[in-house]
Image (tube, grey):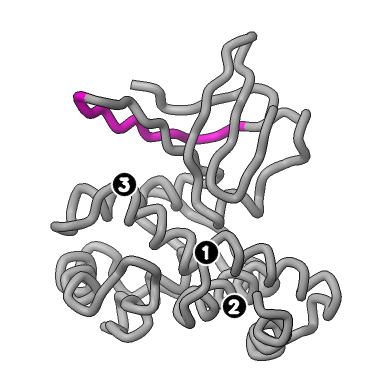
């Protein structure tokens, strides 16, 4: 079992990274929520990991925070019909705090807006995870507990994730949506609302 990687960040893409650990390059698939927290390429990085073993492949998944990995594992181990790929979609399409809030509120509509998550899957998520996540405090900047981990989200991070999720719900690809929102945020600044970010992306065609 590989539980973490600590080394030099060689390559960073919205969906995967390569980390040089003492001369050995490890490739790990990551959610957008972790991509935004990565250091610059060439810098030292610490990634928590989950190794999925199948007959035809050994796939490593990486996460910046314990909360992300805990939620990933909770999804693939608890919710029927959700595998690693869809679990990454969930983490990429909705921030951890927003996901916990949606589950606690039984917001099937919000969950089904995530790429790859239909209404039936969203309903299973609510039924199977509500008691495990509980009613959580999800105010921006506050700590959010998921399993045994915690993650602190700034207001900007919440808006970034929410705007990305909104574009994905409108039919855009996750990577394109994320890149467009980041560009819009750079132009409009941290004071821009989620609505303003989404509108700016739509005008540019995301």
Which residue: 23% across, 62% down?
132
Q: Nearer the viewer, mark 1 or mark 3?
A: 1
- Please tell me the numbered disc located at residue 75: none
Say above or below: 35 vs 42.
below
Q: Residues within 10 Å of mark 1 (few under 14, many from 20)?
A: many
- The percent position of residue 8, horizontal first and vertical second, equals 69, 24
Q: Residue furthest top?
A: 23
Say which element carries label 3.
helix
To which residue does mark 1 refer?
A: 174
* Residue 95 inside the magenta-drawn segment: no
What is the x, y in percent for residue 175? 57, 59
Image x and y of residue 70, in percent? 36, 48
| Mark 2: secondary structure | helix
- In 3D space, how far apart are the residues under numbered discs 2 and 3 (Cα atoms)? 23 Å
Highlighted magenta segment, given as a residue range: 46-55
Q: Quadrant of the C terminus?
A: bottom right
Residue 17 drawn at (x, y percent):
58, 36
6 or 60, which lies in front? 60
User: What residue is shown at x 18% (from left), y 54% (from top)?
Assistant: 78
Task: Please name the residue shown 52% across and 64% down the image.
Answer: 174
Alpha carbon distance from label 1 to label 3: 16 Å
SS for tag 1?
Answer: helix
Name the residue that disc number 2 marks: 163
**Residue at mark 3:** 84
**Disc 2, disc 1: CB below 8 Å?**
no
Dividing the picture into quarters, in which one does residue 145 lie?
bottom left
Q: Is residue 11 left or right of residue 104?
A: right
Instruction: Mark 2 or mark 3: name the one nearer the start of the chain.
Output: 3
Q: Quadrant of the N terminus?
A: top left
- Residue sitting nearer the eye, 89 or 146: 89
Left or right, 197 with respect to 101, comes to right
């Amino acid at each position: 079992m590989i539980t973490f990687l600590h080394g030099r960040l060689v390559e960073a893409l919205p969906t995967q990274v390569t980390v040089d650990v003492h001369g050995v390059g490890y490739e790990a698939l990551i959610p957008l929520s972790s991509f935004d927290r990565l250091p610059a390429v060439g810098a030292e990085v610490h990634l928590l990991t989950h190794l999925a073993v199948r007959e035809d492949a050994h796939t490593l998944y990486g996460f910046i925070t314990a909360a992300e990995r805990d939620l990933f594992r909770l999804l693939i181990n608890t919710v029927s019909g959700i595998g690693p790929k869809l679990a990454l979609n969930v983490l990429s399409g909705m921030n951890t705090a927003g996901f916990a809030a949606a589950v606690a509120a039984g917001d099937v509509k919000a969950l089904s807006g995530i790429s790859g998550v239909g209404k039936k899957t969203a309903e299973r998520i609510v039924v199977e995870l509500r008691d495990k996540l509980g009613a959580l405090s999800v105010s921006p900047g506050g700590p959010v507990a998921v399993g045994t981990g915690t993650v602190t989200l700034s207001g900007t991070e919440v808006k970034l994730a929410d705007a990305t999720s909104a574009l994905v719900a409108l039919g855009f690809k996750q990577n394109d949506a994320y890149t467009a929102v980041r560009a819009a945020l750079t132009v409009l600044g941290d004071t821009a609302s989620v609505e303003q970010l989404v509108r700016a992306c739509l005008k540019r065609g995301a």
